[in-house]
Amino acid sequence: MPSKTSAFASMSATSPLGPHSIERRDPGASDVQIEILYCGVCHSDLHTARAEWPDVFFPVVPGHEIVGRVTKVGREVTLFKAGDLAAVGCMVDSCRGCRSCESGREQYCEKEIRFTYNSPDPHFPGLMTYGGYSKSIVVDERFVLRIPGKSELSAVAPLLCAGITMYSPLKHWGAGRGKKVGIVGLGGLGHMGVKISHALGAHTVMFTTTPSKGEDARRLGADEVVISKDENAMAKHAGSFDFILNTVAAPHHLDAYVDLLRADATLSLVGVPATQHPSITVTKLISKRRAIAGSMIGGIQETQEMLDFCAARGIVSDVEVIPIQKINEAYERMLRSDVRYRFVIDMASLGN
Ligand code: NAP
Ligand code: ZN
């Protein structure tokens, strides 16, 4: 028997989020039922709730940085039991059989990736999956993460999207000792990027449009800070980077960052703006065999590796905890780059 769960939802692209009731399935044999304690607020939540991306179906219950406590498990579940802490990120299932899934890169599933929200939900035909702005969630144990260590839970939640979205490309493109790495945009993703790049041992340079964030960037682990609107400051770094990871959520000129790459270096994009970036100048790529690439979150095993990596080094997110009733205000502040550096919803505020 499915059970009613209170949630916060966006009912159309133009309406604010408000209280809503959804159904969650009773846990099946391999399912874990989790009472959600905290949920981080990602810019992707805003893009989806306002239908800035295609294929959004309402109501939308956003939220994919979920931490909570297990309340019930199915009879075949071996990794979790009632009372354990558990976490869920951006995916709740995938085909499990394609080359991507078999190699632990479920985020690049070739057949059918199921995101935590706004994906068709086979358990409720005709409805979409609903995310973490809710009291509880039921997820197959293969897509549930363990929370190691004793860190403050609200500050762990953003690792489930912001953390892994930075960790995966930093590892893939070899950020580490002896490498010069740039992180563009000091928001939810960017602040985790600086922390993780620094922890990996890379010489880390923060690019920000907001001069007042400079001091914070150094505290978070940046060796240098560049105000990206300052052309002279940018020019000093021409041709010097091994890797640049760009998190900006708005369209902007990428040439300015391509110029900063060494030969054979890569600029990887993770921001998904609602409209496209202006076209790049191809000769800047050709003349130095530079690459522009993209990256999406990370695989399940890699997400666990990232949680363990962060726990071992005491890395968490810098958060501002809010009651869910402040979510619309938080979205407006996020748009003004006024978040230091991730909003996290205390789900106790949702009531029953
Ligand atoms: P966020 O907290 O709003 O941070 C974005 C940062 O970009 C801002 O803090 C700001 O930093 C900078 N910025 C914003 N507008 C800008 C502009 N017009 N020009 C230059 N810089 C600007 O957002 P987020 O949660 O980190 O997410 C960032 C993007 O990544 C979103 O598009 C989101 O959907 C996407 N995302 C992708 C993945 C993936 O797997 N690829 C995963 C999660 C999120 P400064 O003030 O420092 O300039
Ligand atoms: Zn996200």
Image: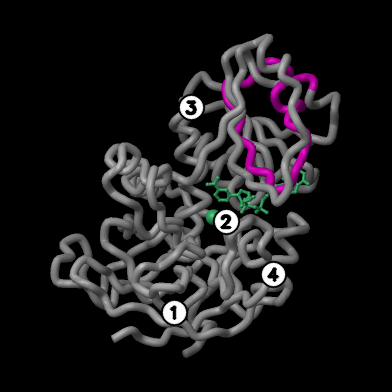
Who is closer to the viewer here, 262 or 208? 262
Question: Which segment is the magenta one?
Answer: 235-258
Residue that mark 4 sits on? 13
Q: How many numbered discs sit on the rendered protein? A: 4
Q: Earlier in the sequence, mark 4 or mark 2?
A: 4
Mark 1 to mark 2 CA distance (whole Å): 23 Å
Q: Nearer the viewer, mark 3 or mark 4?
A: 4
Check disc 4 and report its element: helix, strand or loop: loop
Check disc 3 and report its element: helix, strand or loop: loop
Who is closer to the viewer here, 116 or 182? 116
Is 257 included in the stretch rendered in magenta?
yes
- The residue at the point 39 percent across, 73 percent down is 125
Whether residue 180 appears in this view of the structure is no
Residue that mark 2 sits on? 318
- The residue at the point 26 percent across, 75 percent down is 27
Residue 4 at x, y = what percent? 41, 87
Who is closer to the viewer here, 227 or 289? 289
Mark 3 to mark 4 CA distance (whole Å): 36 Å
The amino acid on which the numbered mark 3 sits, given as a three-letter code, is: Trp
Residue that mark 3 sits on? 173
Is 260 included in the stretch rendered in magenta?
no
The amino acid on which the numbered mark 1 sits, given as a three-letter code, is: Lys
In the picture, the disc for residue 135 is: 1
